[in-house]
Structure formats: structure tokens, C-alpha cells
Amino acid sequence: MPLARAVQTGQNTAMGFAHTLGGTRYVFDDLKTLLARATPFRSGDALAGVAAGSAAERVAAQYALADLPLRHFLHEAVVPYEADDVTRLILDTHDATAFAPIAHMTVGALRDHLLDTPDTTALAPGLTPEMVAAVSKIMRVSDLIAVARKCQITTRFRNTIGLPGTLSIRLQPNHPTDDARGVAAGVLDGLLLGAGDAVIGVNPATDNIETVMRLLEMLDHIRTRFDIPTQSCVLSHITTTMVAMQRGAPVDLVFQSIGGTQGVNESFGVSLSLLAEAQDAAHALQRGGPNVMYFETGQGSALSANAHHGVDQQTLECRAYAVARRYAPLLVNSVVGFIGPEYLFDGKQILRAGLEDHMCGKLLGLPMGVDICYTNHAEADQDDMDALLTCLANAGVTYIMGVPGADDVMLAYQSTSFHDGLYARRITGKRAAPEFEGWMTRMGVGGDAPALHPALIGLA
């Protein structure tokens, strides 16, 4: 039975939130219900039974949410404080000083403020994920783009990610059997097309420690042989990466998928303390820095793990960003369409979710990228990805994926190609990270270079 209920105008409620629309008074019993009903429709919320029952109910919830004071989010948790370490992290680390300039505002007033102010960076420590999720729910696509492009988040390992006028690309040379020659071919393809300044990152087909170490050593060999100012990562489970570090493998970045509740993180086999332990281990290697973590997120993961607590998937996605920012990552990205149509049904839902994730992550202070992607059973195609790519490029996305042919032959999903990265840079006038661009010029890669370096010709 839905928590939100429609009653006739004139009947009020002692608890919850309400708004009258078209002669009907819609009542929402608690904050998580209000947030869920206000969310633009997506299949995952319908699957979870938390979506609005009609467009009218959704609009009423958005009106009620717009009138909600921001202070309320500090007094009502969508997931119980006593039962969830992510909730405790959010509330215990909230910065009252950073919050003070907006403490008098409602969600609607915050939207207006974000659109009017030229720089939102200082607000990040004072914003909770639920506040950010709320304001995104009353924004149009143009609002999401306009606000996100104001957020400038810079991180560093061997190069500098997120500087003004730059757009980085993760080089993703996955192979279905982790064949070293196949991975190396993908790396070369990407480097010759200007990809790899965010990271050269391989998703291993298995989490076997020997395979992971072999791939780490191969990627590091390529990087050192050509003196490439970037970082590499094998996206194994964090515990496997920690074993690799103990065995002396050349680990640059520690990767992990994370979520917005304690339960979903436990389903991934991680905890906040384990993330801190891995971060400390990576810092101890002193291979670069100071940002040594790489996180991936995605709307729907909590519902998949039955760890959503009746909260809508986009609010939970924002809570994952609170986990990420605790560990000062070099990179964070939403794999927006990867989980499937059960959560984001079609290209329209994927586009909206990708822009929400990007803006919300940026507002919370993260170096936010997006894997602009879809599975083959979703109602989406590459035209939908072109539309999202174009929107994100203009929204100032920190980085995108570069996959050979936009078709990941190991993970079996569709993403963006190296050529798509070149298109995004071209239409926005953006360039690679400056250190990486300098390397490209020296090696003869790119339109400004006179000739390809002999070493790369030999590798080809």
C-alpha cells in the first residue's frame, strides 16, 4: 500500500508533507516518500514500488519538496542513523559553517541560488546528498547542465584532472580472456586517438590475483616505457588489489564499486573501514598523489541488493557520493545505463539520470565522470548516447569512457569510443589534461603533432 495518499482538499495531516493540486490534497508521510514521489519517472522506482502513482502526484510532490526548508534534512534521515553507517557518515561530517550561507533556504530557493551564483564550490561540505538529490528533482535538463558546468573540481595523481578547458578520457581496453596482447592493442588504439589521460583502466574478466598482477605489470611497463604522464588501474575487487599491493605489484589507483547504504556496500564486500585501509596502503606506496582512489556508482545497485530501505534510486546514488568524497578520489563515475532497463528503461531515462548524477556529484565536490552507456536489452541506441555525450560535454563532465568501437567485448555493453571523445573535445574546444597533452605532442599524437614517434610506430 503506497505511503503517499490522496485526500480531498481541506483535510490536513499532523505529520508528513502535503500539497494541493487540482482540488486534491496529496499527503506524503515522510521525507523518503516525498523524495521518491518527486522523482522524474524511472523504471527502477516503479519496480521498487516507490514511484509516484500519477503525473499529478509527482508534480504535487515536487511542489511540496520545493517548499521544504533545507534544515529539515539535518533532522530526518531517509535511512535510520542507528542502522546505517552511510547515514552516520553524512550527518556526522556535515559542515555547519559551509551550510550557514544557505541555511535559511528552501529546496526551491537553493535551486534559484545555484542557477544565479557563479561559483558553487564552497557549498559542497555544507550540502548533504539528500539536499542535492532534492534540488535535482525540481530541475529541468537545462538546469542540470547550467549548474554542473559551474562546479570546478580538480584532482591529481601523475597528471591534473578537471582543470578548466579540459575533458579527460578513461582508456578502457578490456578483453574477454584478459589476453595481454589484446589489452595492449586496445591501449595503443586509445593512445593514438588521445585517450588515457584520466586513467588506463582494465576491467579484468576474472578476479584472479595472478591475472590482476600480470595486467598491472603490463600496464605499468607500457606507461614507463613511453614515459606517459597518466595512471593505470586494474579494476579488481579492493581486497584483490590490496593483496596485489602486499605482493609488490605496481598499483597506482585503488578501485571499488560503492553504494549509498551500508547494506549495498556489504553486498559489494566492502565497508567504510576497508576503504580507509586500502587508501592508506595506496598512499604508502607513494607512486603519485594525493588522490589514489577510483570509485564507480550506478542508480539501481541498492535495489539489486535489496538494501534500498524504500528510498528512490537517485537519492541513494547521491548518498554513494558521500561515501566517495570521504576518501578524496582521483576519479568517480556513474555507469549510468549499465545495470539495465529494469532501472533505467530507455534513452530518455538514461539521459536524465546521467545529467542528474553528474550535477549531484559535482555539487558534492567530486571529480565526476559518466560512463555514457546502455545494455543491449535497453530501449536505447547510440543516438541516445550521442545526445547524452553532447549534453555532458557542455555540462563540463570531468571525463568519459573510451572503449574500442564503443563496444565493450568483455562486459558486453555499449559505451563511447575514442572517436566520441575527440568529438566531445572538438565541439567544446576542450583539450586533454595538460601533462598528457604535452606527451601527445612529443609523441606525434593528435592534430597539432608533425609526425608519429618512431617508438609508437614500432609498437604498432
Image (tube, helix red, strand yellow):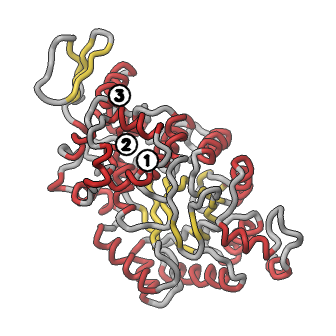
Residue 62's disc number: 3
Q: Are marks 2 and 3 in contact (CB under 8 Å)?
A: no
Which residue is disc 2 drawn over?
133
Depth check: 307 or 150 in front? 150
Residue 273 in sight here = yes
Depth check: 358 or 308 in front? 358
Which residue is at the far bottom?
248
Q: Residues within 10 Å of mark 1 (few under 14, many from 20)?
A: many
Q: Along the horizontal axis of the image, is 334 left or right of 275?
A: right
Q: Is residue 82 above or below residue 140?
A: below
Q: Is residue 114 above or below residue 287?
A: above
Q: Are marks 2 and 1 in contact (CB under 8 Å)?
A: yes
Depth check: 71 or 264 in front? 71
- Residue at x 36% of width, y 32% of height: 108
Which residue is at the far left?
14
Disc 3 marks which amino acid? Gln
Q: Where is residue 132 shown, x and y percent of the image?
A: 37, 44
Depth check: 113 or 223 in front? 113
Disc 1 marks which amino acid? Cys
Q: Along the horizontal axis of the image, is 304 left or right of 419?
A: left
Which residue is at the far right?
450
- Residue at x 59% of width, y 46% of height: 392
Q: Where is residue 381 shown, x and y percent of the image?
A: 64, 40
Q: Residues within 10 Å of mark 2 (few under 14, many from 20)?
A: many
Ranked by sequence position, the earlier of labels 2 and 1 is 2
Which residue is disc 1 drawn over?
360
